[in-house]
Amino acid sequence: MGGATDDDRRVRRPGESGHRAVPHTADIRIEAWATSREHCLAEAVLGMVECFADVSGVRPRAVDRVRLAEASDDDLLATLLDEVIYRLEVYGQVPVDVEADEADGGLDVRLAVAGLSDVEITGAVPKAVAWNDLRIGPDPYGWSCTVTVDA
């Protein structure tokens, strides 16, 4: 989010991580930020989950590890969110915590997951990641990303 608006300054502070959903016609638009690329990617996952489920107080049933191959930062963001959507659709798993670490240009991700039946559904479940206006990169505060998710 280079060129932060006044709204961004109220939400973001140097050294902090976070995410938020912003209004977008018929879809979910997620903004995430952190001090590093890996933490920003993890915040994007948590932001997407928060748009459709309340995971507060939910304990994970399992911890899954995902290895994403070396790719551009935009590709890593899209691939990681697609992986979460896939696990949601196929296995009924919802991440309640996420950690990501750089590994040879790629990404090692730890997903602490709960069952879909263990969480309160609060919105439309995501179906796909849109490539239109997808962006992740360094900014004055660290790293930030924006992505639209089709619900």
Image (cartoon, rainbow, N blue to C red):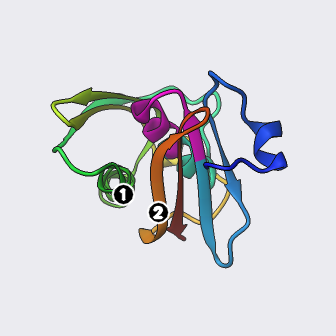
Identify the residue at the far bottom of this view: 26
Q: CA distance from mark 2 to mark 1?
A: 8 Å
Who is closer to the viewer here, 68 or 62? 68
First in sequence, mark 2 or 1: give its number. 1
Who is closer to the viewer here, 2 or 95? 2
Residue in the image at 62% along x and 21% along y: 15
What number is the disc on residue 78?
1
Measured from the top left, where is residue 111 in percent x and y? 36, 33
Q: Would you say the magenta stretch is mainly helix, strand or loop?
A: helix
Measured from the top left, where is residue 2 in percent x and y? 61, 48
User: Is residue 42 located in the magenta-colored stretch of the structure?
Assistant: yes
How many marks on residues? 2
Q: How packed is label 1: few (under 14 Cα within 10 Å), some, or many (20 or more)?
A: many
Q: Amino acid at mark 1?
A: Ala
Q: Secondary structure at mark 1?
A: helix
Check the image and report above or below for 34 versus 15: below
Check the image and report above or below for 3 versus 57: below
Is 115 on the left or on the right of 86, as rendered?
Answer: right
Q: Badges 2 and 1: C-beta atoms under 8 Å apart?
A: yes
The magenta-colored residue range is 32-44
Residue in the image at 51% along x and 26% along y: 59
Residue in the image at 52% along x and 27% along y: 35
- Can residue 51 be seen by looking at this rendering? yes
Identify the residue at the far top of this view: 15
- Eye-nearest disc, 2 or 1: 2
Q: Which residue is mark 2?
A: 134
Check the image and report above or below for 4 versus 123: above
Q: Secondary structure at mark 2?
A: strand
Q: Amino acid at mark 2?
A: Leu
Who is closer to the viewer here, 118 or 80? 80
Is 104 on the left or on the right of 115, as rendered?
Answer: left
Measured from the top left, where is residue 68 in percent x and y? 21, 43
